[in-house]
Amino acid sequence: MNRKKHRYWLDSPDNVRKLVYGLYALCAALMLLDFFYHKHTNFPFENWFGFFAWFGFIACVALVLLAKQMRKLVKRDEDYYGDV
Amino acid sequence: MSSLNPALILVLGALPALVLKGHLRAAYVLLLPVLSFLQLYTLPAGIRAEFEILGMLLTTLHLDRLSFMFAVIFHIAAFLLILYSLHTRDRLQQMATLIYAGCAIGAVLAGDLITLFIYFEAAALSSVFLIWARRTPASYGAGMRYLIVQVISGLLLLTGIILHARSSGSIEFTQMDPGTPGGALIFLAFGIKCAFPLLHNWLVDAYPQATVTGAVVLSAFTTKMAVYALATAFAGTEILIWIGLLMTAFPIFYAVIENDLRRVLTYSMINQLGFMVVGVGIGTELALNGTAAHAFAHILYKALLFMSMGAVLLRTGRINGSELGGLYKSMPYTAGFCVIGAASISAFPLFSGFVTKSMIMEAAALEGYTLAWLVLLFASAGVFHHSGIKIPYFAFFAHDSGIRCKEAPASMLCAMAIAAVLCIYIGVFPQTLYALLPYQIGYQPYTLTHVITQLQLLFFSALAFTWLVRQGLYPPELRSVNLDADWFYRKPGRWLAEHAMQSIVAGEQKMGVWIKRLSFSAGTRLHRHHGPQGLLAKTWPTGSMVLWVAFLLGVYLIFYYVY
């Protein structure tokens, strides 16, 4: 990037790394919170340790990896319908 | 004035907007939704305005708590959308917006099926101009397909109404049985408008082809009219739970691989509609409250997201994730508003989605729908993934695309700011929204369990995204088209239609030759009998005339007795 141009905080990879580590720390803290309060739940499995945390993580990884496989089936050229 | 329908203020008031100019027009179009809203507000609760036409009693205005709530949010939306569209000089679009909004309001205030049908059709007709107004061949085609689907839905609705009226003797718009032929057709008609799975493609096809403002306007009304209609007519119909679950789950896969960011938003819209449909299907007071509240919040944050993407499209001329990135440098305010919309749709605590979506999930849990609850939880994580992260990330952050442009126009920023404030206000003060709900129930969204579990779900979804991106596993944004159910009518359907057309044309040509021959021989015959020397050109005796009349009467009588 041109030196004269304004450098934004996010332009620095170090800062991005800080954000990512911040996210890791936050996730760890949220997971640990499960030790410290009593959950009011409707289903027994909600009481498993960190249920919502690992559900969210696995759901998203599965979603993205499945969607990636789906591309093999449904992806076509941009002008497939001939109207672009 | 006391029972004047607010819808008429918008629909009829839209006409002068076509001739007014400059600031006067801007002031006028902004004032109309305000006036209409004041009229709605002064209407006494439970009012019914009826009039008789062709022996039918039409209830053009029927105000209950559910219709009031939808009418309120439609007014707020109409005002914001008009404000958002002030930068455009295209008067047709603003007029279409006002008429379309007016029709949507008329539809939710309709007390009978005929009035509902008329407003549904008028909404379809007025809204298609928001697609065509982009004036590209692609938008013309998409608009046509949109219109055809809407008209088919309208025809199903009309047929359903006729069958329903014949069997029940009433055209009142109230709870119906989807098991009767009439009820089933009406159910299907609403289902098309609500983007049920396999009937949903008009939405993902047409909305991204609409103009910058058009897509925002479209996102607010048609589908929510359908949600209102389903909630009024088919609350507690269990199949809606399963339909709704499909709607929440399948579009998020498409949203992950879709490149056009406005199309990503349409897929996420089906996902959100799915939550509402599930709520209607469960049909308890909590669930229906959840549906109404979620529709209310959804219109605001979805409009906000579409507005931010519209601003990006306006300023950069691009909307594909593969071509954008780093725009927060040029459009910081738009980026900020987009993030607020993203946080709202993802149901972060203190944002609107958090206090509305959870009512539907709670209702599902209380009724013991374990599988449904798990699918909704999956969909909640998924919606954060593609609407909450993907949209802002690929448009405003990610790698810097190098695009430098102006910030969005002031009118757009104002509209986005108001929508953003409302999203946060609802999230922070949910009781204001709950006071509008159809049923009075005590629901408390801010419990320790709810806040922590929701934050866990969301931040671990974000963690998954971060991990996938850093591992290089995240699918890149690619210029492509993804096949969906519309393939059936856009490829084989089109092929069939074209071949049918060709054979018709060919047949016509063959027919033409035949017709020519026939008409020639008929001409000579006519000349022979009716010409100057012809037998039938002579004056006829009265007797033969009587004979012919008797013959015709005889034929008539035979038909009369047969049928």
Image (spheres, coloured by chain):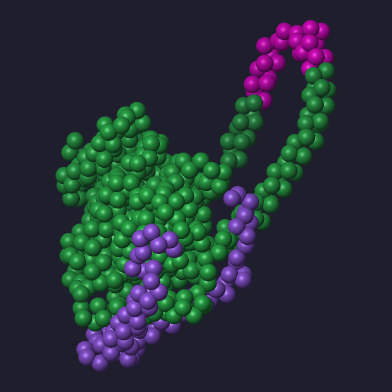
Chain colours: A purple, B green
Q: Classify residue B376 as left or right of residue B258.
A: left
Write down the quadrant of residue B57 in the picture.
top left
Q: Residue at x 20, y 61 (%)?
A: B425
Q: Could you tell me residue A22's position as x and y percent?
A: 32, 80
Residue A61: give x, y in percent of width and height: 46, 79
Q: Position of residue B279 (x, y in %)?
A: 34, 67
The answer to whether any part of residue B512 appears in the image is yes
A80 w.r.t. B245: above or below: above
Vertical arrangement, residue A39 with respect to residue B354, above or below: below
Q: Which residues are magenta?
A: B525-551
At 28% from the left and 84% from the top, the residue drawn is A30
For the image, the number of numbered tags is 0
- Residue drawn 66% across and 56% down? B492
Image side of residue B500 versus residue B392, left or right: right
Most foreground residue, B471 or B281:
B471
Name the image quarter holding the C terminus of chain B.
Answer: top right
Q: Residue at x 25, y 88 (%)?
A: A33
Image coordinates of residue B37 in percent, x first then y, are 22, 45
Most extreme residue toward the front is: A3
Q: Quadrant of the N terminus of chain B?
A: top left
Q: Is residue B109 visible?
A: no
Task: State yes or no: residue B15 in magenta.
Answer: no
**Nearest the eye: B467 or B480:** B467
Instruction: Name the side, left or right, on which B448 lies relative to B462.
Output: left
Q: Which picture quadrant has residue B18?
A: top left
Q: Is residue B546 magenta?
A: yes
